[in-house]
Image (cartoon, helix red, strand yellow):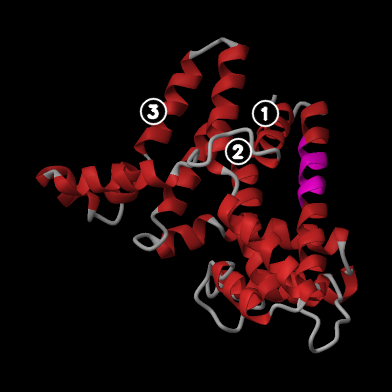
Amino acid sequence: MVVLSLLIALILERFRITPEGWQLEPTANRWDQWLSDHEQLGSWRQHDLLGPLLLISPAILLAFLLWLSNSILAMLIINVLVLTLAIGCRAQRTALRQFLLAANRGDEEARKEFANELRYVNDDELTIGQQLVWLNFRFYFAVAFWFAIFGAAGALAYTLLRARADSVPKLLAWVEWLPLRAAGFGFLLVGHFSRALPHWLKSFSAGVQNPPGTLGELASRAEEVLAEEDDHTSEPDALVNLVRRNMVLLLAVVAVATLFGWAL
């Protein structure tokens, strides 16, 4: 069920079958705003413990409803609906394609414009390829990771937190701590193991400091890129291929876990 749901959702996202605005972020933002606008709920929303619980309360409710349900078909439909709302960053995918086209034809002005659109994290030290690694982690890997562990409710809870990343940065960093190390270990297995291993071990002592930089450095170590100074496409291409292999590895691990009865 887990693998089937993930495959269906990834295929729907890959072929752009879902509508352009089919993402959870706008709804999550409106939900948080609704909580803040109500006097009592707004005060609870500011609480260190109750605030995040209120934010992810739709996921808690979904977990309860799924626990009561015995319908496999209903669970599959809900899984796919939640996953298609949670995964994907269509605007950045379009910007990446335009970025590569502009770089290949030597259009520096257009290349820089689309490079700015690809900067998901405001960190000038991250390369374009590392920005893409972080995008993949947040919009694909971490969603699939928490879905594999906690089902649709886990994916929904993570997405609700991701949508409000600016208001719960520390909590989100802790939520992403485990999947980030899992993603990093995947980079070791699908990339250059010995080059990346020391940096993966070092990531445990980094705590929750600068997660995008930690993962980006791991990816760069796992995928060696030899590019000329004016070559703007080799590094993004190489790191995108790395994260794609890592997603395939994650699906394979989940499939094996399903076969052994460790996942439903």
- The residue carrying pointer 1 sits among few (fewer than 14), some (14 to 19) or many (20 or more) residues within 10 Å by Cα, namely many
Residue 55 in the image: x percent, y percent?
A: 33, 45
Disc 1 versus disc 2: distance between alpha carbons?
10 Å
- Residue 117: quarter of image: bottom right
Q: Residue 29: x percent and y percent? A: 34, 48
User: Which residues lie in the magenta part?
Assistant: 247-254
Query: Can you see residue 205?
Result: no
Regarding residue 80, the answer to whether it shows in the image is: yes
Pointer 3: residues within 10 angstroms few (<14), some, or many (20+)?
few
Whole-number angstrom distance, CA of label 2 to CA of label 3? 16 Å
Q: Quadrant of the C terminus?
A: top right
Residue at the spot x=42%, y=65% of the render? 170
Look at the image and say whether residue 250 sits in the magenta stretch: yes
Mark 2, residue position: 147
**Which circle's residue, 2 or 3, is located before the other in the chain?**
3
* Prevailing SS of the magenta stretch: helix
Q: Amino acid at mark 1?
A: Ser
SS for callout 3: helix
Inspect the image, locate mark 2, and give the three-letter code of the amino acid beneath it.
Phe
Apparent side of residue 97 relative to residue 86 in the rendered image (left or right) = right
For the residues labelled 1 and 2, say whether their Cβ atoms are less than 8 Å apart. Answer: yes
Direction bottom: furthest residue:
229
Q: Which residue is labeled 3 in the image?
A: 61
The disc placed on residue 5 is 1
Mark 1 / mark 3, whichever is N-terminal: 1
Q: Label 1's element?
A: helix
